[in-house]
């Protein structure tokens, strides 16, 4: 019996070594390890041995079966690994690949810089709805219906089923939050920054987008003057664009401020000498500002006889374009990683 086991084992291992694919391996398993295989037939003959020989024969039979099974499993794994195309094989000993990490968008980064500049001056951030009522977006800001100033805003209206007229819209600026903030805090002094998306129905080009990020500032209190506005904005411009920057204020019209002004800085590229970037004027406009119109103060709940205030607004994309020398606003929203990775 012992010789039969050894002969079977040597023959099985020899044939196993000659197997070249998984199909031959399966045929080998059926021949030797299957229910009707050679190993099973010999195992059945153990019961015919004398009782004193059965334990030793059974132990030898189980050992041979174990060795043949382990040899078959090892050969199958080797053939499976060899069957995988080289490009699909995984070397688990190689170091892992680092996952791609996102970075802060340049517009968001610029907005955070603006926060950091105004925070020491006492300004806190407040937000408001992006879908706004006509009352807040225009009327309470001294822009009544049929006022010519409405032509400045290419408005995207929203008409819900229950609306009888066009009273709801995607806000065209963040100024509606001025009124909402004054209604909330009146009669307390206010110093707030108002960031958020704004929407206008206009053609997209290198300097215009139908959606843009605006940040607006509002300060209301007793004794606030135009000198305070100029001091705050001059400090902002020099911290954002460099201490050597020169600033210029010129009269401009905005219906919710009186007087109104536009603020410009000397050209970053040519240092005020005149170039293509600044239109050969030497100046780059960065924002609009002015003293809050008495009508707007009154609409917000403040007595214009006792309170004054100033407001300013800027496009965050424009500030980023000037700061980093970007010549096309569309690059911010094109999802081109080659562009965005420059700011990581």
Image: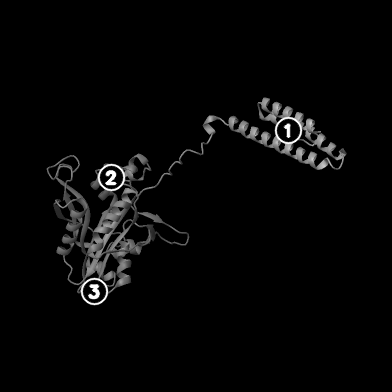
Of 123 and 189, the residue lying toward us? 123
Residues under labels 3 and 1: Cα distance? 97 Å
- Is 100 displayed left or right of 195 in the figure? right
Mark positioned earlier in the residue sequence (3 or 2): 2
Residues under labels 2 and 1: Cα distance? 74 Å
Give how far across and how far down residue 118 sits, in percent: 24, 60
Above or below for 147 versus 184:
above
Above or below for 67 versus 223:
above
Residue located beneath label 2 in the image: 207
Q: What residue is shown at x 26% (from left), y 69% (from top)?
A: 190
Residue at disc 2, secondary structure: loop
Give how far across and how far down residue 197 sits, in percent: 35, 55
Q: What residue is shown at x 33% (from left), y 47% (from top)?
A: 209
Asked whether disc 3 touches disc 1, contact meaning CB atoms under 8 Å apart, the reply is no
Report the residue that reaches farthest toward the left: 273
Disc on res. 29: 1
Of 257 and 282, the residue lying toward us? 282
Of 264 and 82, the residue lying toward us? 82
Residues under labels 3 and 2: Cα distance? 39 Å
Nearer the viewer's eye, disc 3 or disc 1? 1
């Amino acid at each position: 019996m012992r010789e039969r086991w050894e002969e079977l084992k040597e023959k099985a291992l020899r044939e196993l070594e000659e197997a070249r694919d998984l199909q031959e391996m399966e045929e080998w398993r059926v021949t030797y390890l299957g229910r009707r295989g050679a190993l099973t037939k010999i195992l059945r003959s153990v019961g015919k041995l004398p009782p004193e020989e059965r334990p030793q024969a059974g132990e030898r039979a189980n050992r041979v079966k174990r060795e043949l099974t382990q040899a078959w499993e090892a050969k199958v794994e080797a053939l499976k690994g060899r069957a995988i195309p080289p490009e699909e094989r995984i070397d688990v000993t190689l170091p892992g690949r680092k996952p791609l990490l996102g970075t802060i968008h340049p517009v968001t980064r610029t907005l955070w810089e603006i926060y950091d500049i105004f925070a020491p001056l006492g300004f806190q951030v407040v937000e408001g709805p992006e879908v706004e009522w006509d009352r807040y977006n225009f009327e309470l800001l001294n822009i009544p219906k049929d006022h010519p100033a409405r032509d400045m805003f290419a408005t995207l209206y929203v008409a819900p089923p229950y609306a009888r007229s066009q009273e709801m819209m995607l806000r065209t600026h963040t100024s509606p939050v001025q009124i909402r903030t004054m209604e909330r805090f009146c009669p307390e002094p206010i110093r707030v920054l108002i960031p958020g998306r704004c929407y206008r129905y206009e053609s997209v080009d290198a300097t215009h987008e139908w959606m843009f990020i605006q940040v607006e500032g509002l300060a209301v209190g007793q004794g606030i003057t135009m000198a305070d506005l100029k001091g705050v904005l001059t400090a902002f411009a020099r911290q954002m664009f460099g201490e050597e920057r020169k600033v210029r204020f010129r009269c401009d019209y905005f219906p919710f401020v009186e007087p109104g002004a536009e603020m410009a800085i000397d050209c970053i590229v040519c240092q005020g000498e005149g170039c293509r970037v600044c239109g050969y004027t030497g100046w780059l406009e960065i924002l609009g500002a002015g003293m809050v119109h008495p009508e707007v103060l009154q609409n917000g709940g403040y007595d214009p006889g006792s309170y004054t205030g100033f407001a300013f607004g800027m496009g965050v994309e424009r500030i980023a374009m000037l700061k980093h020398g970007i010549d096309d606003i569309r690059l911010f929203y094109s999802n081109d990683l080659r562009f965005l990775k420059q700011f990581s």
